[in-house]
Image (cartoon, helix red, strand yellow):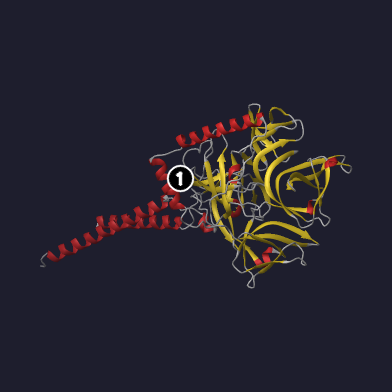
């Protein structure tokens, strides 16, 4: 009987432990949940009355102690700098598993980038440096083909802006396009002819004012000697209206927003009712010719120049004249504009839209309702919006489709929807040829550097079993659509110690009960075998 009591006591103790552990485990187990602030301007830490306590900066690692949902709004409980409060889920990422490009903005075309940092750049499993890295650094000169962005056109990015998803040498992941301190670790390549801030460069720039110097970083310290007025430099890489050039043995960034004649391609549309005069020399008003480009003219350009001029209102050079080089009657002449509304620049690399209007849309030959018809686009047709023109508060959009072009009057959203173009082979552009001996030397040096970089890329790219396994893991992860709900953002929890206690306690109870039943059965059998007197 004494043994039976001990066994039953063990059963009760084990059952009590199981119930206690289970009851404790019924509440969410958050001790191992971590998050990172993903908004570039930080996220506010709020008190229970939703009043801001302070701002937690981007990239800060947080311990999440609770997840709550009220009226469809999810918040995370956390501590920061000794303060306890809550943060919105929109500003914090807690799921650090690889992020699929699906669900993010698909780029209209493949975006080709080249590693421009001598130390190389890292690729990540998500759009942020707090995600895991994908292998070792991509070396200088390695090319990345990007297909998706974490930004939404016309809206602020949720998280660090300018992260794109791409592939390089068999590896896929996220790379940061713009570097916060202006040191561009990546750059575009002239040969792909991809637009940059509404321009398509062809690889040559001529300095029009003395005193220009290169910069190691954007808005950073100046390096090298002054570049004389009239110097022509050849470049193969650019980014955000900055060319990566070499002058007098020093390589750095040269702002193309300064007074420069920049070789580029595009089509100029003359919207000035009186037309526009042509000049022999850019920047020289005394070189005016008698030639005029009439209203409605479409003409190709080969170079552009923004000239800063003195303003009597501000007392400094704050006004601009826009000059474009065109080929007219067999001569290279310059069209000059004082007013930006007198022209539109069509770079032929627009934003893709699909016609949604059931009856289709009508196009005009000019941004004028009295102009001839340019045809009708049927529902489902994919077009490129290449430039726009505002006339008496009405917007006109120049659209191209299958080689044809015309103007649409109205709001695009009324009859079109954003879409993407199927990936296609990138078209090369005609790159500029050296025009001086110095420029030719610069070109040769740049070409030699590019060749060396390309060779280094092929020999130093990571290979072998480790990379193969990594690539397989990334491909497997990107097969699923990225979720944005709060539930999906909370990662799978690690096995809690409470769960282990529950299991052990349950096993103890079962064993004790089995032992108790065995003793009772044995005692009953013994009593049954004992002869009665």
* Residue 303 appears in the figure: yes
Q: Tell me the residue at 59%/67% (across/down).
A: 380
**As drawn, is 226 to the left or to the right of 458?**
right
Q: Tell me the residue at 36%/58% (across/down).
A: 15
As drawn, which residue projects farthest toward the bottom? 359
Q: Tell me the residue at 43%/46% (across/down).
A: 471
Q: What is the crowding at mark 1: few (fewer than 14 residues within 10 Å), some, or many (at least 20)?
A: few
* Residue 493 appears in the figure: no
Residue 515: where, in percent of width, then height? 25, 57
> Is 489 in front, or is 122?
122
As drawn, which residue projects farthest toward the right? 312
Quadrant containing the N terminus in the rendered view: bottom left
Q: Is residue 111 above or below residue 394?
A: above
Q: Is residue 101 above or below residue 256?
A: below
The image quadrant that residue 181 belongs to is top right
Residue 139: where, in percent of width, then height? 51, 36
Residue 332: where, in percent of width, then height? 74, 43
Residue 57: where, in percent of width, then height? 63, 44
Which residue matches tag 1? Answer: 170
**As drawn, is 33 to the left or to the right of 89?**
left
Quadrant containing the C terminus in the rendered view: bottom left
| Secondary element at tag 1 | loop
As drawn, which residue projects farthest toward the front? 330
């Amino acid at each position: 009987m004494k043994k039976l009591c001990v066994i039953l006591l063990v059963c009760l103790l084990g059952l009590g432990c199981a119930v206690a552990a289970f009851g404790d485990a019924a509440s969410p187990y958050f001790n191992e949940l971590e998050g990172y602030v993903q908004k570039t301007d930080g996220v506010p830490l709020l008190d229970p009355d939703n009043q801001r306590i302070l701002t937690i900066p981007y990239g800060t690692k947080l311990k999440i102690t609770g997840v709550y949902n009220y009226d469809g709004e999810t918040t995370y409980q956390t501590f920061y700098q000794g303060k306890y409060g809550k943060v919105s889920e929109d500003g914090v990422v807690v799921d650090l598993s690889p992020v699929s490009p699906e669900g993010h903005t698909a780029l209209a075309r493949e975006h080709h980038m080249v590693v421009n940092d001598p130390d190389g750049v890292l690729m990540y499993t998500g759009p942020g440096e707090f995600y895991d890295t994908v292998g070792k650094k991509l070396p200088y000169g390695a090319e990345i083909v990007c297909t998706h962005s974490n930004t939404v056109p016309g809206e602020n990015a949720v998280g660090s802006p300018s992260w794109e998803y791409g592939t390089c040498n068999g590896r896929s992941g996220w790379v940061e396009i713009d570097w916060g301190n202006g040191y561009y670790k990546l750059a575009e390549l002239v040969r792909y002819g991809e637009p940059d801030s509404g321009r398509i460069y062809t690889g040559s720039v001529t300095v029009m004012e003395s005193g220009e110097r290169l910069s190691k970083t954007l808005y950073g310290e100046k390096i090298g000697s002054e570049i004389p007025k009239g110097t022509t430099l050849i470049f193969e890489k650019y980014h955000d209206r900055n060319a990566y050039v070499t002058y007098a043995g020093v390589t750095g960034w040269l702002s193309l927003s300064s007074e420069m004649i920049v070789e580029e391609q595009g089509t100029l549309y003359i919207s000035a009712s009186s037309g526009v005069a042509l000049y022999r020399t850019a920047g020289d008003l005394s070189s005016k010719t008698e030639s005029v480009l009439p209203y409605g003219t479409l003409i190709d350009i080969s170079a552009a120049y923004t000239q800063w001029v003195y303003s009597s209102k501000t007392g400094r050079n704050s006004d601009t004249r826009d000059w474009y080089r065109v080929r007219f009657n067999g001569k290279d002449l310059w069209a000059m504009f004082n007013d930006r509304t007198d022209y539109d620049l069509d770079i032929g690399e627009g934003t893709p839209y699909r016609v949604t209007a059931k009856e289709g849309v009508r196009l005009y030959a000019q941004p004028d309702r009295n102009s001839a018809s340019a045809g009708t686009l049927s529902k489902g047709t994919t077009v490129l919006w290449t430039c726009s023109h505002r006339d008496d508060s009405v917007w006109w959009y120049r659209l191209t489709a299958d080689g044809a072009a015309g103007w649409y009057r109205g709001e695009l959203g009324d009859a079109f929807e954003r879409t993407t173009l199927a990936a296609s082979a990138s078209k090369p552009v005609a790159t500029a040829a050296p025009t001086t001996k110095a420029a030719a030397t610069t070109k040769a040096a740049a070409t030699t550097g590019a060749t060396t970089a390309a060779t280094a890329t092929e020999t130093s790219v990571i290979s072998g079993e480790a990379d193969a396994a990594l690539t397989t893991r990334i491909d497997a992860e990107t097969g699923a659509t990225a979720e944005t709900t709060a539930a999906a953002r909370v990662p799978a929890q690690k096995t809690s110690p409470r769960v282990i206690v529950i299991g052990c306690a349950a096993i103890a109870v079962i064993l004790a009960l089995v032992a108790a039943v065995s003793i009772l059965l044995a005692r009953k059998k013994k009593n049954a075998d004992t002869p009665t007197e």
